[in-house]
Amino acid sequence: MKDIPMLDLRLEYEHMKDDIDSAIRKCLEHQQWIFGPEVKELEDKIAGYLGVKHCIGVSSGTEALVLSLRALAIKLKGKEYFDRADEIITTPFTFTATGDSILRAGATPVFVDIDPDTYNIDPAEIREYLKHGEGRVVGIIPVHLYGQACDMTEMTDIAREYNLFMVEDVAQAFGGMWKDRKLGSIGTAGAFSFFPSKNLGGFGDGGMVSTADNEVAELARMLLKHGGKDKYNVDHIGYNARLDTLQAAVVLAKFKYIEEFNEKRRKIAEAYSKKLSMVKGIVLPGELHDPHYHVYHQYTIRVTNGKRDELQKYLKEKGISTMVYYPVPLHKMKVFKGRWKNYRGLQKAEKATDEVLNLPIEPLQQKGHTMYVAENIMDFFKK
Ligand SMILES: Cc1ncc(COP(=O)(O)O)c(C=O)c1O
């Protein structure tokens, strides 16, 4: 029986071994573990790649979100945190950190429903809330879920019309694009994650804030090191949220491969879609019509006949790992109880949690493995 994991980081390490080993060896030689030269080198490299003025290395994608929001609270309100009356609109169909960062920055998350084809936040739902909600919306956090851009033309228009800041959650979409812009370079700020399983991942936690805004950049840099320019005389309520030199070195070494690997992901997605297009009972990933570059952090099918869990079990028996991202929408989690708002139902997000299944998408996975996964899905629906 085959054993097909969601992702096999050992394969990736073997592929990049010389680059990674020499990057780590360099760190062992210089011993500058905090703010070593690799941190700045990575920041500069990614800023150039994204076409954005500032990139700031931080300790995780979660902290990248929190620091961006805290910096915006300080800049816009002149206060350390937002107030509960300040609302930030996002999707309930995302990783907890997106919504949790809003709570940690002192604001109230407003969850609006998703576009059921792309699973991303639906701009029409944002507009509905802005028309009918009674609160004071200050910002939006579009999440480029599974590696696909939100409709950034609409997002930008909405932000401009209503004078909102926009923090892009780019945790799953490094290298993704909307038209000719890299994701993370369009909003007021972008929050990236270098969690090991991400398209560009380190050997532990790490993240980055991107922004064109000088003040946000300066504040984020202060907040990540306890809240001051001077560590021993601080201005703000800060964090210890630096990006480790070692993680920066690993991410730098892997950065060389990002475009090649994103292309490989897209090829796997294409192969799945070709093979599975005739299967009744599933819906393949939907893409927006406007030009964009989907980096397929996940390849997600929707099982519409109520047999998602049965399919997952069947595939497991055939040695195929799959995941459900995400099984619980944020508004159903205890942590958000009594702490979030909406205008109307979130049924599309709820339905997605019952129906989605994420298939293995290891950039280096053999074609035969992709076909084996697809064939087993086809067999399941023939039963
Ligand atoms: C959409 C999304 N936002 C935020 C995060 C948080 O990133 P991290 O795990 O690096 O804190 C993740 C990933 O884990 C994510 O998938």
Image (cartoon, helix red, strand yellow):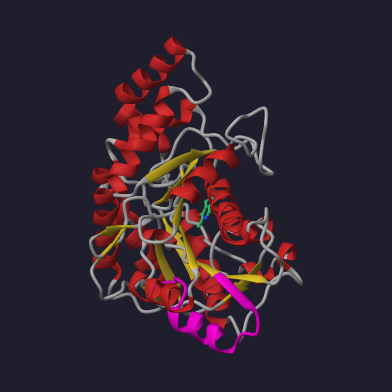
Residue 120: image quadrant is bottom left
Q: Which of 182 and 298 is in front in this view?
A: 182
Residue pictured at 37% horizontal, 20% vertical: 21
Furthest toward the top, the residue is: 29
Furthest toward the bottom, the residue is: 132
Residue pictured at 57% horizontal, 59% vertical: 98
Residue 10: image quadrant is top left
The quarter in which the C terminus is drawn is bottom left
Q: Is residue 189 above or below residue 152?
A: above
The image position of residue 173, as x and y in percent, is 38, 55
Q: Which of 299 and 125 is in front in this view?
A: 125
* Image: magenta residue range: 118-138
The image position of residue 148, as x and y in percent, is 36, 63
Please indicate whether residue 329 sits to the left or right of residue 257 in the image.
Answer: right
Please indicate whether residue 63 sits to the left or right of residue 40 in the image.
Answer: right
Report the number of numbered marks: 0
Magenta highlight on residue 137: yes
In this view of the protein, can residue 37 be seen by the observer?
yes
Magenta highlight on residue 298: no
The image position of residue 342, as x and y in percent, is 63, 80
Residue pictured at 60% horizontal, 53% vertical: 70
In this view of the protein, can residue 364 be seen by the observer?
no
Q: Which of 319 and 154 is in front in this view?
A: 154
Q: In this view, does 336 lie above or below 73?
A: below
The image position of residue 290, as x and y in percent, is 25, 73
